[in-house]
Image (spheres, grey):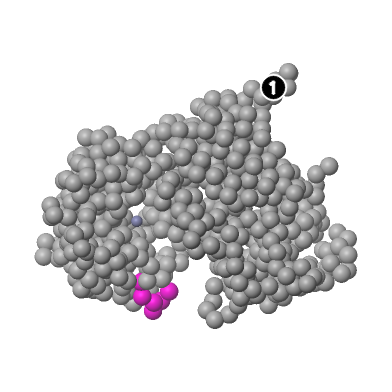
Amino acid sequence: MKIKNFALIALAALSAACSKPKEETPKFDYNVDKFADIEILRYQVPGFEDLSLQQKKLVYYLTEAALWGRDILWDQNCAVNLQLRPVLEEIYTTYPGDKDSADWRAFDQYTKQVWFGNGIHHHYSMDKFVPGFSQEFFTDQMQRIGVEPDAQAELTQIVFNPNLYAKRVNQADGVDLVTTSACNYYAPGITEAEVEKFYNAMRDPKDATPISYGLNSRLAKDNKGKLYEQVYKIDGLYGPQIQKIVENLTEAEKYAENEAQRQTIQLLIDYYTSGDLRTFDEYSIAWADDTASQVDFINGFIENYGDPLGRKGAWESIVNFKNEEASHRTEVLSQNAQWFEDNGPIDARFKKPNVKGVSAKVITAAILAGDSYPSTPIGINLPNADWIRAAHGSKSVTLENITEAYDQASHGNGFNEEFVIDEPTRQLMDDYLFITDNLHTDLHECLGHGSGQLLPGISTDALKAHGSTLEEARADLFALYYLADPKLLELGLLDNPDAYKAEYYKYILNGMMTQLMRIEPGKDIEEAHMRNRKLIAEWCYEQGKPNNVIELIDRDGKTYIQINDYQQLRQLFGQLLGEIQRIKSEGDYEAGRNLVETYAVKVDPALHQQVLDRYAKLSIAPYKGFVNPIYTPVIDSNGEITDIAVDYTEDYPTQMLRYSHDYSISNEK
Ligand code: ZN
């Protein structure tokens, strides 16, 4: 599972600097490029210089293994992507004409969009990009660089015909999802019904440890009309790229931190060699069990969002190492799980006598690749196979250098100035929102969801359709309530008793106002996390009215949130936590439904429009992605690697062109 930055778009826009004053270092430039609806950022890799030389070499070869998979993903996304890319890039790098012309500017944007989408479709909407340059311009350029006439006609169709390859992944109801999706997991002409029949025949319902059928293959049809799998492996489909990946994994293996990690890498090599999904499961188990190594990575056919039937794995890789300091936070919380359980504002009958915290690890990403590049998740929870998760557990990680980059890059985008009521509140958020946001997530994930118990005989799905909204509200309230607890200072997780106010202000502002920017005018709030935030904020606003705890201030037609009493707000969070825990523990569906329907769903149209108007003026790009650092071995006169140098200066087109040049099989000499 990928945890996308959906929630973070609003969150990062609001937050700012880290709690601790930064040492005097040259200012790192997070902002790289901006085009269409995209902003390109760069991220830092703090702590890389503190790794041992062996660990640095391990990271280096794993990043090489990561970059060699790029073209696999391009081809998986759509069969024409690798046909178009070299033509776009040749035009891009050799264009002799006026770079101020409308055609060139549109071509420049289109090429950047295609790079970002790893092909001709938008990474999020899945729609085909619409070129803003003229067909004549494109034809002229193709002629200039010597594209054959037949290929010219084909490429013109690919770029300009809106009905051809219209959507990468189609999820619409009532149509054949396979034939109407442009992704390349199924050969042309194969229908959804044929795919279902093919894989249903493989499944053994009695198998308690089923492999992920179809994960690492393309489905094709032979000349007799029979379906067969083209397996992704060293002597199969994508063989040349997989060969390169394996070569680099073989190098990486030499620098493994311990025997368990060495074996994990070897299992991955075995899997790439045989294509056997049983070996992939063995690898996944070994990977999930390895919690001792500091350096870690994913590399393979993992997530299935790119397949309309949710079966085929898109190639991706992320190389990372554990952020010991930040991981300490989640370890401290986990160790004190029972204290938090015992001291919560909920009825004793609903408390767990023995509670166990989940220890999630915080990591520093060193490279993003394949389906995780340039658009990247902020958290990952793997493996995906249900039976492995049940029997061996999973690893849950947060990519904190990525969230920090989002956060830093949003600094100065005008969001806080527009929506936060006054300078002291903005200052508090500048100083403490990054750390309190992280702590809020830690409390929510490590302790919140796992706290509390059901009364005997109460079903886990008694709250039915409202279950997930109320469950998210429970975990959020747990986090909000404890964020203001002196215990966090005592545990050394916060250094200022007022720090929590930064998160409280953001939470109420987001729940009542700013999250509405993601809702279309006239629509209700549907998504569970958004409903939960609105429920909590609106309920506290209503219940706090007699004492004016939260106030809506109007200034020249603009609404601002003012919090008059933070301690009373904390008591309200506690009160609602107690009530929602009761609802869950007793399975009180009616009371749960009532809370959701009253506070979480309906939007005030006037306030909604106001938020949309104010947000639109800020011109903040809705989607963000990253360029990677460059890792270069430092080699001494004996040919030995003595260090790995990290460089952050590469811009977006240069990186894309370099990857196309250095990590494409067709360019191999
Ligand atoms: Zn949650």
Q: Is residue 584 left or right of residue 665?
A: left
Query: How many badges with numbers are in the image?
Result: 1
> Which residue is labeled 1 in the image?
640
- Identify the main secondary structure in magenta: loop
Q: Visible in this render: residue 205?
A: yes
Q: What's drawn in magenta, residue-wise?
A: 520-525
Q: Position of residue 233 (x, y in %)?
A: 69, 50
In terms of secondary structure, where does tag 1 sit?
Answer: loop
Q: Is residue 368 visible?
A: no
Is residue 101 shown in magenta? Answer: no
Figure quadrant of the C terminus:
top right
The picture quadrant for ligand 1 comes to: bottom left
Q: Is residue 503 left or right of residue 62?
A: left
The answer to which image quadrant residue 73 occupies is: bottom right
Q: How many residues crowd mark 1 within 10 Å: few (<14), some (14–19), many (20+)?
A: few
Q: Residue furthest front?
A: 206
Q: Is residue 53 above or below residue 561?
A: above
Query: Residue 655 in the image: x percent, y percent?
Result: 67, 46
Q: Amino acid at mark 1?
A: Glu
Residue drawn at (68%, 77%) of the image: 163
The residue at 59%/46% (across/down) is: 279
Using the image as rendered, state which of residue 42 and residue 23 is in the foreground: 42
